[in-house]
């Protein structure tokens, strides 16, 4: 995005002072600058002129004053430099400014411009192009002021009008280039995101292909014992099983269908290379059989087999022009994501446990409870952040007053005189003390077990 901005940040291509000795070109440049400063004044912008006077104040239509062309011209560094060195000499047009402004409001160009609900930059440029060529340049009084210059020529005047038209057109083209660059960047990011998910889908497709091969081997006429009782560790990979049930992946595929079914030769080629690799042999014969090992297997396969594959690069090139360049980066993101899957195994198991208990109808900490006030709820029914606050110090567990708000609340609860409340508080404090001795990541499980016993 920064590169696109740097390419297009100079919205106006302001012409430089001509180095030629041609009379027409020199006069054309003077006309060109006069017309630029007329646009500024007709937009309601004031600046210091060559005689040290400020440009006059005129009544400018609100819509014209809000036009972005005048403001962009005024902010241009080249125009600012010309103003600073006293190059803005348009005093001869002062008596015409209000009449020209009124003529603009009465013109058909203004009526068409006013009908646009939310005028864009292209509409602003088009409006000023029409005003310059049909109102300003055609006004006899403007031409009369221009003729006061001894270097006046018809060719030079027409060339100056054409120059400012080219400048405004270049501004429009430059902004459109910026917009197009933004669109291209967004499309590139979207495709990179699609490649990220496609690599996960590719691993799932490879697993399905191997499962199909194992099933077909069992139906052989002369099936061997290995065919009938194959090692299914690869197809039973726990990481792939979790991918199949991943809600984020499912949601993305519903909106952006991604499939490798149209690349059967690629699937077969990659699977053959995987089965021939030493990584596969070590994985299938390794004594360790856990979720972390399953994740490590696919991380190693991605690094050594899938990502360096020429067949994959060729397939990606046919799918998207962006993907060959994005593959190294997105491949790294996928490998890191698999590592995060492996490290978050315990939390995901806890989450699955909570979901199972919800299906059984057991109330958990994340479900709406009852209509009782939160301060009257037993501790095991309180939100986890309150339990953390109350169990972070031993004093809080035993109910003594402390600086923490949770500790004060525990002390206040002990003063409740409702029947049976002291017994409940004592039981809850014992539960909380037991809870505080466990690691935080086990709190969900302890709470769920406590709830299931109630």
Image (tube, rainbow, N blue to C red):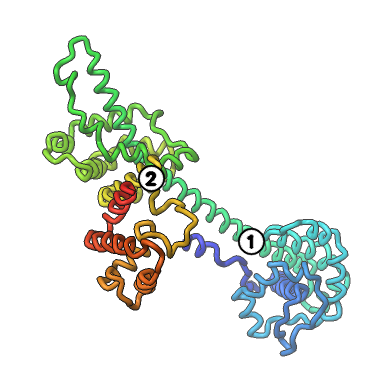
Q: Does residue 182 appear left or right of residue 449 in this picture?
A: right
The disc placed on residue 170 is 1
Q: Which one is earlier in the sequence, the residue at label 2 or at label 1?
A: 1
The residue lying at 43 percent from left, 44 percent from top is 194
**Residue 174 location (% of width, % of height):** 60, 60
The front one of 430 and 282 is: 430
Residue 218 is left or right of residue 203, and the answer is left
- The residue nearer to you, when weighing 411 against 441, is 411
> Which image quarter: residue 89?
bottom right
Q: Can the viewer see residue 348?
A: no
In the image, residue 257 sits, relative to residue 94, either above or below, namely above
Number of on-image labels: 2
Image check: 415 left or right of 181?
left
Q: Do the residues labelled 2 and 1 touch (CB within 8 Å)?
A: no
Within 10 angstroms of label 2, few (less than 14), some, or many (20 or more) residues? Answer: some
**Outermost residue to the bottom:** 52
Q: In this view, does 239 lie to the left or right of 364?
A: left
Q: Which percent across, then down, holds residue 4?
A: 50, 60
Residue lying at 25% horizontally and 31% vertically, measured from the top left: 235
192 w.r.t. 147: above or below: above
Task: Point out residue 407 in the picture as x, y percentages from the top left corner.
Answer: 34, 72
Q: Is residue 422 visible?
A: yes
Above or below, comparing residue 216 to residue 197 in the picture = above
Query: Please, what secondary structure does the residue beneath circle 1 have?
Result: helix
Measure the C-alpha gap from mark 2 to mark 1. Answer: 68 Å
Q: Which residue is drawn at 73% across and 65% down?
A: 159
Q: Residue 407 carries which label?
A: none
Percent x, y for residue 80? 63, 79
Q: Nearer the viewer, residue 37 or 416?
A: 416
In this view, the residue in front, 143 or 93, is: 93
Disc 2 target residue: 362
Crowding around mark 1 (Cα neighbors within 10 Å: few <14, some 14 to 19, many 20+) is: some
């Amino acid at each position: 995005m920064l590169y696109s901005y740097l390419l297009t940040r100079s919205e106006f291509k302001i012409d430089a002072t001509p180095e030629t000795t041609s009379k027409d070109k020199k006069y054309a440049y003077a006309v060109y600058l006069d017309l630029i400063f007329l646009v500024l004044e007709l937009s309601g912008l004031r600046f210091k002129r060559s005689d040290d006077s400020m440009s006059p104040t005129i009544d400018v239509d609100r819509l014209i004053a809000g036009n972005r062309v005048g403001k962009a011209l005024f902010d241009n560094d080249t125009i600012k430099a010309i103003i600073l060195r006293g190059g803005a000499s348009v005093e001869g047009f002062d008596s015409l400014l209000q009449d020209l402004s009124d003529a603009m409001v009465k013109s058909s160009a203004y009526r068409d411009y006013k009908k646009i609900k939310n005028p864009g930059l292209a509409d602003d440029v088009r409006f000023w192009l029409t005003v310059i060529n049909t109102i300003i340049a055609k006004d006899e009084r403007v031409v009369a002021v221009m003729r006061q210059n001894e270097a006046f020529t018809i060719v030079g005047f027409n060339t100056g009008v054409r120059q400012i038209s080219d400048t405004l057109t270049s501004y429009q083209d430059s902004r459109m280039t910026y917009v197009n660059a933004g669109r291209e960047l967004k499309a590139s990011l979207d495709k990179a995101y699609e490649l990220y998910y496609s690599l996960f889908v590719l691993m799932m497709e490879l697993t399905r292909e191997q499962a199909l091969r194992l099933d077909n081997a069992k139906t052989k006429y002369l099936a061997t014992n290995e065919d009938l009782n194959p090692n299914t560790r690869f197809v039973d990979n726990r990481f792939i099983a979790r991918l199949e049930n991943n809600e984020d992946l499912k949601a993305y595929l519903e909106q952006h269908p991604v499939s490798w079914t149209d690349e059967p030769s690629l699937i077969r080629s990659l699977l053959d290379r995987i089965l021939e690799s030493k990584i596969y042999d070590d994985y299938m014969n390794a004594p360790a059989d856990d979720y972390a090992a399953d994740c490590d297997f696919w991380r190693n396969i991605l690094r050594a087999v899938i990502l360096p594959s020429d067949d994959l690069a060729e397939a990606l090139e046919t799918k998207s022009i962006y993907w060959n360049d994005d593959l190294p980066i997105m491949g790294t993101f996928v490998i890191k994501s698999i590592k995060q899957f492996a490290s978050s195994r315990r939390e995901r198991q806890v989450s699955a446990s909570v979901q199972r208990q919800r299906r059984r109808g057991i109330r958990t900490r994340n479900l709406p409870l009852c209509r009782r006030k939160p301060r009257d709820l037993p501790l095991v029914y309180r939100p986890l952040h309150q339990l953390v606050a109350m169990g972070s110090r031993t004093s809080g567990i035993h109910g003594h007053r402390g600086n923490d708000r949770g500790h004060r609340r525990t002390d206040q609860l002990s003063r409740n005189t409702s029947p049976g409340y002291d017994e409940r508080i004592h039981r809850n404090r014992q539960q909380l003390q037991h809870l505080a001795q466990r690691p935080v990541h086990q709190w969900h499980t302890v709470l769920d077990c406590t709830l299931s016993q109630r």
